[in-house]
Amino acid sequence: MRAPELREQIQHHTDLYYLADEPEISDAEFDELVQELRTIEARWPDLLTPDSPTQRPGGGVASTFAPVTHVVPMLSLDNAFSLEDLVAWGVRVERIISDPMRFVTEPKMDGLAISLLYENGRLVRGATRGDGVTGEDVTANVRTIASLPKRLQGADPPAVLEVRGEVFMPLSSFKELNRRQGEAELRLFANPRNAAAGSLRQKDASITASRDLDLFCYQLGAKEGGPKLTTHEQTLQWLLDLGFPVNPEIRSFTDIGGVHDFCTRMLAQRHDLGYEIDGVVIKVDELAQRDELGFTSRAPRWAIAYKFPPEEKTTLLRGIFVSIGRTGRATPFAQLEPVFVGGSTVGLATLHNQDEVARKDVRPGDTVIVRKAGDVIPEVVGPVLAKRPKGLRKWKFPTKCPICGTPLVRPEGEANTRCVNFSCPEKVVQRINYFTGRAAMDIEGLGEERVRQFVAAGLLEDAGDIFSLTVDALLPLERIGQKSAENLVAGIEASKSRGLARVLIGLGIRHVGPSAAQALARELGSMDAIEAASEEELAAVDGVGPVIAASIVEWFADANNGPVLRKLRAAGVSLLGPPKADTSDVEQTFAGLTFVLTGGLDGYTRDEAAAEISARGGKVTSSVAKKTGYVVAGASPGSKLAKAEQLGVTILDEAGFVDLLEHGPPFDDPDPDE
């Protein structure tokens, strides 16, 4: 069915975007997947599930940093993709609010959302948005941002203040960073957003400090003390008075017409601001009106993001070539006459697959339309037929791998053509490179160029060989000194303790991204257990399902994958998941019950409360539905509390939760007629 397939695709690309900072598709393509899923769920409501990406904020939480539960959830925003969508949103909110409204508009920064917590005027924590409920503790890195106040201005700061903002990299800093990366023969960053996200997630804060990040603050999360605020404009002015940087381009309007004009102006000025933006955020100004409008399961009704349309330019298509990925997928790409589009100069662009080339009928020598959709990955939209030279021949997809010469194969029912030679040199390089990447084993200093060099030197045949590398073996190679060799070997040794989930990601099993890998490691506990599990047992793991389960079974059945596992075991790489709590003596009083947690608890962290529920056989989900058993509401609960009240779900405060843990849920009164 299309809906489950879309959910898996969306989760996969969400993990790549938020956890690995290495998106495979553009923002526009991702938005199209989400919109397709929304359309299906609206037409067939029975296909809607509580954990659908359309029902919760996007994002994810990496394991590199300590988890942080936000005081108030950091929700997503609904999107408007046209000015007509924007006007329609304005009509909807005006139907609910009878009094006159003001709207506040601000450039939509293309960076990384951040939560900043202050206690008695001092910065105590900085956390990424994560999945909206749980983020990553990046306090040490946030402190390196020069524009961020470490201590608030004024004599009487609030006892507690949480402020939301966007960390970004100015275009001048991005250009300088890529210049340094190029001189050091390191990988260039694709765009300022990825550079900012990667810089903020550095384990060494001194690297973050060298990246020249900046910040704009735009919203209050929570506060205890301080002045009574009634509008968003007042809030922004108060934040300025406290010393927070606020975007000077923010404006307010009394009607959607003014908002419309602002969006048009920002679209025209998007490359003149000194930083990347991908739209405009529009918010209702009056805080009381916001309370009246409320929230959906994933976003406030009182705000919307107008996304700029993808930019397009025309240029000459010099040639079409094919690259080979780690799975053997043969991807056609266009070599272009360099053109400035979407904020950067583009010389290469994707053509996706064989069918897309045929459908678009682009030919070397054509003048083509290039789109930098979502400011991420350039693509060729199609030819300008009026400018096509006479006699230009159609391009034909190659029949053999351009690297190893093996015949290319297109499996029945698939859009992609693949090189099926497991030992294809390019596939070997890409598999090893994926294994060493940040989302997997995170081996610093072992990027694609180094991997390519080591494969060519005969040192690596698969990822397992990484752990046999020695200083003596590396020293004869070009551009490898004693210190760099020692550092690399030390980094490889340190990566052995990354854990089972990271290894699973690195092995590149089809469909197994960070979320599925963590679920498998948590529930099955070891590589041996995963290998021994049946397809049905794997599919039963929450967060896996039948598609991923079948892919895992297929991977272990492939004899080509055996050697790398044997090498990992022999090298002492940890193939174990996190230790599971002993629940053998805990009565399973919550069996079959689903819980939702919202707000902060005094006696438990979010993870501790979830562990107590799981130990008793219960399940914690992120969305409230009719079948939810209990909603546990702590301090400053979010929109889930209102949803629970609307659906009539039982709501527990912390005392009620503790009582339920101790005594279990009450039994229903027996039917007197039975």
Image (cartoon, rainbow, N blue to C red):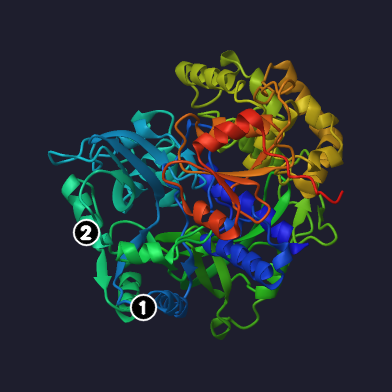
Question: Residue 297, how many percent across, how many down?
Answer: 54, 58
User: 503 or 339, which is in the foreground?
Assistant: 503
Residue 624 x, y percent position in the rendering: 60, 53
Q: Is residue 111 above or below residue 492?
A: below
The x, y position of residue 23, in whole percent, is: 55, 51
| Residue labelled with disc 2 | 234
Residue 62 makes an appearance in the image: no
Query: Is 84 left or right of 420, judged from the image as shown?
Result: left
Residue at 36% in and 39% down? 180
Q: Which residue is mark 1?
A: 98
| Residue occupying the point 47% across, 56% down | 76
Q: Which mark is residue 30?
A: none
**At 62% from the left edge and 83% from the top edge, which residue is drawn?**
390
For residue 640, above or below residue 89: above
Q: Earlier in the sequence, mark 1 or mark 2?
A: 1
Q: Is residue 246 visible?
A: yes
